[in-house]
């Protein structure tokens, strides 16, 4: 897309410099039109990792071009000629350095580790055997568990697999794009810290990610990491094949627990002390619409944090990774698992049925690395205040026993936990890393068109109107600090996106020489559009929360009046805090270093910036220049740095109250409805989960998995009535149940078969269930 077409104007770029007098500041605002300026995605958190942001920031690499990882040409080989051009794939893969094999003395190091010796002695004591020196039986058990975790690599098998992968990706996709500046950053980090292990924490939209990310690093002559596999039900042949390629597994549940945990933790320590690289996928592929952290990722991160805290490893560099597909080989959440050879073959053959390059493009983004040791140090001294429990602060607000939760949430100094809570440190780091990975994930063109068709033009739209809307939302995405994974002329990109969505749309020719685009109202097509459009929710999440909160305030008005409606800052902030508390952390992705009140203030500023709200002073207050209404004290009383109150510490008297008015232009109205519809699938799922609880109730104790399945069937039944199939996903049903557990609607108790739910005492009353339903319904925008 050219800059003229991206902006919709003749001037390709707009640069405005504001130089306030007296402060020596210069603020430069650049509209990052594609092809000229791109947002620098993946920066570390300025609060948690300020030193990493400074040390590993390479600004000169931010404006480099892109590299197609699967386009291997004669230039990638040191040979030239006619024959080389036909064998360049083989030459490039064969000439590249092979992966470093696991040292042969690793098993001996792990065997001599004190943790292993102690675990073997405890196992003997449990079996009522004398605690003598470790025997050969313990060594055999250790080698068996270690063999399940990893095996020696096969360089020939790795090279053959990579050659096949190049052929497969060239057959299925147009390109695999990688920003050259990000690759250069990783190279400089590896040169600057050669002995420091680098761990990649990645999103996980498809099973192809296991092979895609290592191959992308291999194409840039970077060290290929070991890949942590997130499933334990693979067949023995698939597990052996993957281990030969560098995949590592966690010990199975059938192994002796003390010894298995000791071997696994010692193996991770040895892996990190040797300076090996590791790739861990944060998400679970069965949750496409919400970013749920997988159990395996939680286990690996726990071990990494323990290794750094114990001092075994001085530091670990963390690099979040974002992966975006125009169309996945096998969409996440469809039920197919790469657990056997035939499942992988079925997925590939189903993808090969269309003609070549029918799945679009792939984009892989690597965020700026940051130090894990620095994160732990900052977390320890910053987040020492306990987190307010939602059952104590938010649930009374829902049930009507408390009118406001503003004071409790605004007075909280941070979203932290006590220092002795290791679980909170792990959860906070996982949420922090997942947010960084999602923030650096590019938005593809098919995702933008799917979101426009599903959430803005559900009843149909002309192709000319879609052609004019596409660059507007593309520019908004870039201005929000997210990148897009496409380039080219606008008509070409739009035709390419409609071709990728050909199974979900219908094109009609109208007499005005235009084409009308309609979506097919079926569960599969709506589900595909919803999955693609969900990538836009993290981009506009804050504005969507603000729009739904304003809609809730409008719903409280007795009737639509013609006079201007002014909202106070406190009531808007209060409603946004309620909605933020209602959303699950896998959707909100709020970092642990950010206070809820400050988050709502940020949302309010974004609403003003995009024009949905305009600021007004209190109409009944005197003019701002009237200083006679304030009384100044003799001695200045300085406020604390974290004091987020809006009062002036040097003045005693009346405080200034801000009012906001909703924008009334057609553009603001369309954008307001679009934002509400983006969040509607989540809110409608919450509403129907509350209705399901109200209609069905709960008798005794039920396993959480069974209750989620029953709720999913209920969502499918409701979706058939109003064709809202985007609200009938299993992942959203599980997210709603976890939200109700956090709120105190359900009480959860562990068992051998998973979590068991039972209804809390307060919601045995049908009246409280109706209050919960009506509270959620106020945020939902009805068509």
Image (spheres, helix red, strand yellow):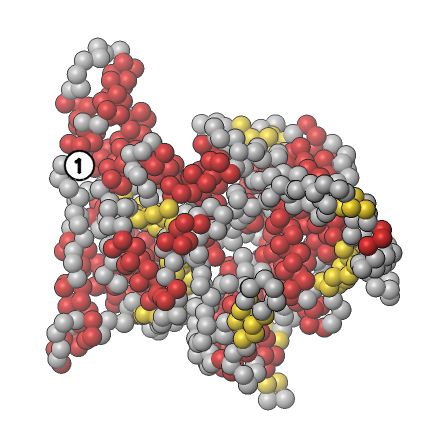
At x 71%, y 59%, the residue is 782
At x 76%, y 69%, the residue is 664
Residue furthest to the front in view is: 634
Quadrant of the image occupied by residue 185: bottom left
Q: Is residue 719 left or right of residue 95?
A: right
Q: Position of residue 466 (x, y in %)?
A: 58, 77
Quadrant of the image occupied by residue 479: bottom right
Q: Position of residue 772 (x, y in %)?
A: 71, 41
Residue 341 sits above or below residue 160 on the image:
above
At x 36%, y 70%, the residue is 64
SS under mark 1: helix
Task: Tell me, yes or no, if residue 258 can be seen here.
Answer: yes
Residue 555 sits above or below residue 108 on the image:
below
The total of numbered circles placed on residues is 1
Q: Is residue 127 left or right of residue 93?
A: right
| Residue nearer the viewer, 740 or 118 | 118
At label 1, counting other C-alpha atoms closer than 10 Å, the crowd grade (few under 14, some 14-19, many 20 or more) is some
At x 37%, y 41%, the residue is 373
Q: Position of residue 224 (x, y in %)?
A: 25, 54
Residue 80 sits above or below residue 584 on the image:
below
Q: Position of residue 688 (x, y in %)?
A: 65, 47
Q: Is residue 400 left or right of residue 79?
A: right
Task: Tell me, yes or no, if residue 264 can be seen here.
Answer: no
| Residue nearer the viewer, 190 or 551 | 190
Which quadrant of the figure contains the C terminus?
bottom right
Residue for badge 1: 106
């Amino acid at each position: 897309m050219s800059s003229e077409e991206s902006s919709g104007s003749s001037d390709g770029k707009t640069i405005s410099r504001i130089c306030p007098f007296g402060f020596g500041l210069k603020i430069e605002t650049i509209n990052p039109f594609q092809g000229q300026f791109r947002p620098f995605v993946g920066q570390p958190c300025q609060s948690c990792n300020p030193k990493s942001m400074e040390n590993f920031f390479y600004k000169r690499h931010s404006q480099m071009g892109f590299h197609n990882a699967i386009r291997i040409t004669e230039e990638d080989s040191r040979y030239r000629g006619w024959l080389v051009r036909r064998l360049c794939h083989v030459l490039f893969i064969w000439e590249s350095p092979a992966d470093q094999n696991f040292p042969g003395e690793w098993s001996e190091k792990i065997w001599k580790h004190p943790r292993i010796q102690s675990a073997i002695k405890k196992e003997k004591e449990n079996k009522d055997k004398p605690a003598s020196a470790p025997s050969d039986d313990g060594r055999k058990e250790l080698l068996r568990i270690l063999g399940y975790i990893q095996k020696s690599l096969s360089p020939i098998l790795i090279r053959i697999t990579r050659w096949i992968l190049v052929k497969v990706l060239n057959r299925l996709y147009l390109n695999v794009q990688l920003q050259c500046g990000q690759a250069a950053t990783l190279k400089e980090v590896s040169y600057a810290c050669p002995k420091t292990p680098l761990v990649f924490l990645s999103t996980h939209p498809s099973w192809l990610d296991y092979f895609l990310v290592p191959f992308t690093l291999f194409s840039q002559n970077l060290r290929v990491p070991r890949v942590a596999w997130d499933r334990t039900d693979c067949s023995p042949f698939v597990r052996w094949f993957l281990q030969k390629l560098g995949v590592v597994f966690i010990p199975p549940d059938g192994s002796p627990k003390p010894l298995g945990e000791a071997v696994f933790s010692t193996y991770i320590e040895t892996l990190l002390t040797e300076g090996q690289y590791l790739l861990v996928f944060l998400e679970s592929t069965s949750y496409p619409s919400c970013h749920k952290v997988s159990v395996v990722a939680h286990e690996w991160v726990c071990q990494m944090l323990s290794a750094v805290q114990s001092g075994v490893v001085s530091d670990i560099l963390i690099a979040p990774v974002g992966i975006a597909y125009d169309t996945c080989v096998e969409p996440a959440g469809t039920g197919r698992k790469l657990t056997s050879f035939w499942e992988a073959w079925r997925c590939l053959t189903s993808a090969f049925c269309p003609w070549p390059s029918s799945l679009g493009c792939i984009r892989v983004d690597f965020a700026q690395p940051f130090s894990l040791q620095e994160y732990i140090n900052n977390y320890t001294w910053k987040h020492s205040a306990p987190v307010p429990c939602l059952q104590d602060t938010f649930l009374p607000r829902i049930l009507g026993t408390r009118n406001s939760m503003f004071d409790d949430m605004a007075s909280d100094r941070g979203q932290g936990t006590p220092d002795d809570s290791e679980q909170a440190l792990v959860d906070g780091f996982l949420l922090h890393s997942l947010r960084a990975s999602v923030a650096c994930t590019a938005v593809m063109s098919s995702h933008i068109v799917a979101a426009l068709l599903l959430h803005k033009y559900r009843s149909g739209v002309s192709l000319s109107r879609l052609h004019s809307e596409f660059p507007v939302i593309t520019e908004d995405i870039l201005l929000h600090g997210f990148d897009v994974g496409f380039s080219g002329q606008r008509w070409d990109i739009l035709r390419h996106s409609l071709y990728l969505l050909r199974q979900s749309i219908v094109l009609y020719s109208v007499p005005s020489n235009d084409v009308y685009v309609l979506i097919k109202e079926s569960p599969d097509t709506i589900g595909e559009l919803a999955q693609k459009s969900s990538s836009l929710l993290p981009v506009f999440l804050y504005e969507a929360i603000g729009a739904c909160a304003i809609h809730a305030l409008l719903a409280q008005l007795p009737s639509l009046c013609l006079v201007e409606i002014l909202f106070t800052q406190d009531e808007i902030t209060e409603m946004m805090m309620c909605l933020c508390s209602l959303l699950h952390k896998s959707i909100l992705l709020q970092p642990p270093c950010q206070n809820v009140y400050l988050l709502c203030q940020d949302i309010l500023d974004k609403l003003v910036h995009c024009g949905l709200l305009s600021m007004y002073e209190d109409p009944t207050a005197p003019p701002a220049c009237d200083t006679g209404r304030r009384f100044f004290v003799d001695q200045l009383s300085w406020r604390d740095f974290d004091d987020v109150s809006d009062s002036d510490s040097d003045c005693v008297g009346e405080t200034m109250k801000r009012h906001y008015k909703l924008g009334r232009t057609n553009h603001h109205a369309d954008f307001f409805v679009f934002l509400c519809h983006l969040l509607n699938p989540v809110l409608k799922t919450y509403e129907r989960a509350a209705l399901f609880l109200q209609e069905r109730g709960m008798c005794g104790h039920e396993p959480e998995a069974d209750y989620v399945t029953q709720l999913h069937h209920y969502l499918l039944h409701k979706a058939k009535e109003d064709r809202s199939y985007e609200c009938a996903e299993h992942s959203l049903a599980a997210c709603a149940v976890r939200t109700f557990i956090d709120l105190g609607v359900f009480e959860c108790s562990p068992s051998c078969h998973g979590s068991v739910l039972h209804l809390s005492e307060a919601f045995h009353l049908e009246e409280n269930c109706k209050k919960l339903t009506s509270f959620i319904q106020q945020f939902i925008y009805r068509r």
